[in-house]
């Protein structure tokens, strides 16, 4: 969700990506890939939350936002089952936090126990692991959904682990988070190169 610093009105830097989101919501209300049977995968709730947060941030696509939230509310429990992977426990609560920041009220009455378990697991992961530790991928690779507790430590870690191509762990979303946290030109150059390779706006995950 990177604003264009050259535009005083605060428009998105990558408007083509926002247009892609508006034009690529699936009929059932979600964004993301389907499995071999045409059904949404476990990644779909995260992609959908990322898209509705971006639309809300830039104040467009009210109907699409409502459809995306309805999909998440209705499908999160059956998509997850009783267990969820580490990456989901990190990213999903972070996406809920971002949704709240842009004014989206998300409640999962049927899945209250499940959502509490996920938030509890995230807290445990953050207490056990360092930003860059032995666990792979490290927490820093999910920078876009982390709530910084030490800005200096975040910047030092980003500088240390930035790749030669300007990316953070080859992740567009984490690199966007790194750019917003540090303003590093290398990060911006990496994101711009992705947009040039995807002229139709398919890189929606760093809006």
Image (cartoon, grey):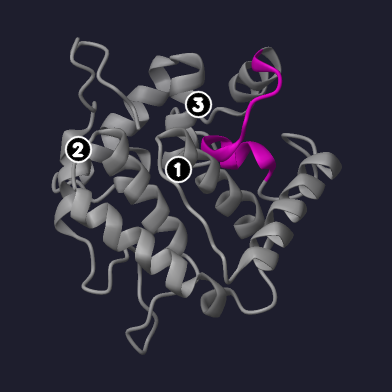
Give whichever of discs 1 and 3 has the lower sequence position. Answer: 1
Regarding mark 3 in the picture, which secondary structure is present there?
A: helix
Say which residue label 1 marks: 99
Quadrant location of residue 53? top left
Q: Nearer the viewer, residue 200 or 120?
A: 120
Mark 1 vs mark 2, CA separation in Å: 28 Å
Mark 1 or 2, which is nearer the eye?
Answer: 1
Mark 1 vs mark 3, CA separation in Å: 19 Å
Magenta-drawn segment: 138-151
Mark 2 vs mark 3, CA separation in Å: 20 Å
Q: Is residue 139 magenta?
A: yes
Q: Is residue 200 magenta?
A: no
- The tag on residue 196 is 2
Residue lying furthest front in this view? 109
- The image position of residue 17, as x and y in percent, is 22, 42
Say few, some or many: other residues with alpha carbon within 10 Å of mark 2 (under 14 / 14 to 19 / 20 or more).
few
On the rendered image, what quadrant is the C terminus found in?
A: top left
Say which residue label 3 marks: 178
Regarding mark 2 in the picture, which secondary structure is present there?
A: helix
Q: Pointer 1 and pointer 2: residues touching (CB < 8 Å)? A: no
- The image position of residue 152, as x and y in percent, is 67, 12
Quadrant location of residue 133? top right
Taking the spot 37% from the left edge, 68% from the top edge, the residue there is 71
Taking the spot 23% from the left edge, 38% from the top edge, the residue there is 195
């Amino acid at each position: 969700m990177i604003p264009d610093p050259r535009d005083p009105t605060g428009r998105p830097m990558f408007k083509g990506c926002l247009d892609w989101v508006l034009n690529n919501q699936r009929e059932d209300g979600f964004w993301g890939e389907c499995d071999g049977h045409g059904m949404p995968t476990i990644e779909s709730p995260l992609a959908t939350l990322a898209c509705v947060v971006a639309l809300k941030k830039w104040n467009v696509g009210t109907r699409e936002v409502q459809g995306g939230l309805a999909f998440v509310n209705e499908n999160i429990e059956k998509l997850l089952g009783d267990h969820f992977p580490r990456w989901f426990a990190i990213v999903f609560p972070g996406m809920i936090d971002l949704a709240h920041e842009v004014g989206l009220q998300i409640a999962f009455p049927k899945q209250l126990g499940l959502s509490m378990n996920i938030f509890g697991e995230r807290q445990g992961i953050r207490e056990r692991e360092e930003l860059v530790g032995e666990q792979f991928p490290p927490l820093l690779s999910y920078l876009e959904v982390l709530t910084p507790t030490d800005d200096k430590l975040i910047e030092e870690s980003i500088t240390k682990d930035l790749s030669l191509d300007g990316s953070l762990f080859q992740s567009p979303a984490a690199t966007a988070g790194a750019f917003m946290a540090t303003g590093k030109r290398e990060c911006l150059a990496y994101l711009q190169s992705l947009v040039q390779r995807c002229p139709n706006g398919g890189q929606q995950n760093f809006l």
